[in-house]
Amino acid sequence: MSLAERPKLELHLHLEGAAPPGLIRDMAREKRVDLSGVFDARGHYHYDDFLGFLRLYEAVVSVLRTPEDFRRLTRAVLAESAANGVIYTEAFLSPDFCGGRDLSAWRDYLAAIRDAADEAERQDGIVMRGIVTCIRHFGPDAARQTARCAAETADDWLTGFGIAGDENAYRPGDFAWAFDCAREAGLRLTAHAGEWGGAQSVREALADLRVARIGHGVHAIEDPALVERLAEDGVTLEVCPGSNVALGVYRDWRRHPIEALRAKGVKVTVSTDDPPFFHTSMRHEYDRLAETFDWDETVFAEVERNAAQAAFCDEATRTALM
Ligand code: ADE
Ligand code: ZN
């Protein structure tokens, strides 16, 4: 089977971060929103560094206003994923951007997103599950409200809770209440850590938030004892190599630690994070991994199995993916 044909599983995709630039331009025109500075001369999203990326992200999100906007967004994102061979995707959804963390508004946005996901499953054969994510730089109080939205809407589709945003803002322990609330509601947990922070940030996410998976986690490589522990405990890393290279976490693909982590027994998976912001797709990630690290069918089968095992879905869905 060629790499393009492999059925791919993605565990780390931000719904708004996957917004096709064309869709955002169309919506901005319809609503007369000024997006100057958002696009470069070629029509790509434009930013200089990580904090610039976060600001740009929020500018893009400012165009997405109604549940219907999120229905259109979800449909477009899933069509693109399916065209890249993705059969299962877990997308981060943010009540912060969907009704400002108001529960009743969040229910309306969630219904619209699920409606689009159901349509995509029928038409494109792609299965989606939602992970509510709080935004770290919005602070612990906002995260509590986000966790309440997640807890009230947790079910067999809305299956996870996580945290994204600026890893240098606050400490993982500041969000323990939100994660406890989500865990008590039966949600499965993940946290962005070790993308900008070092190994200690991963250690704190595991200790204080008790997550099963880590978003990125790549800086764990700097701490051999932590790497050993991740491998022993079967903590799955949602690794996004193209994102890390585009944002400058690593200077080039050769220096990326995904293969070193895998070789040490850590369960790694592959995702795109925010594909149009980083000029990537799941197909592109696969091609670059094969080219850079000589990954063959056996290795791709291993990371796909890791993803199926760590997916936040029910057992029947997992079995169908394996
Ligand atoms: N939100 C969207 N993409 C992100 C990333 N790579 N790191 C932290 N927060 C994010
Ligand atoms: Zn992310």
Image: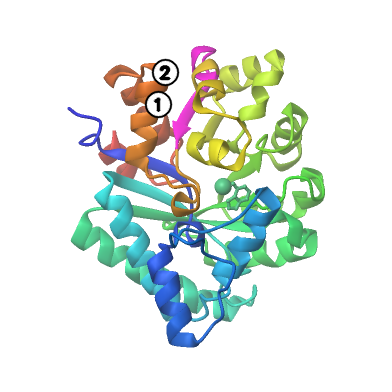
Marks 2 and 1 sit apart, C-alpha to C-alpha, by: 6 Å
Query: Which residue is more in the foreground, 153 or 145?
Result: 145
Q: Position of residue 133 (x, y in %)?
A: 60, 56
Instruction: Give the secondary structure at mark 2.
Output: helix
Which residue in the structure is indicated by mark 1?
289
Image quarter of the C terminus = top left
Residue type, mark 2 in image: Phe
Determine if residue 112 is in view: no
Image quarter of the N terminus = top left
In the visual, does 195 lie left or right of 92?
right
Residue at the (66%, 64%) spot, across then down: 146
Q: What's the mark number on residue 71?
A: none
Quadrant location of residue 95?
Answer: bottom right
Which residue in the structure is indicated by mark 2?
293
Instruction: Give the secondary structure at mark 1.
Output: helix
Residue at the (29%, 65%) spot, across then down: 118
Instruction: Tell me, yes or no, whether the two marked residues, 2 and 1, touch with CB atoms within 8 Å.
Output: yes
Furthest residue to the front?
Answer: 41
232 in the magenta segment: no
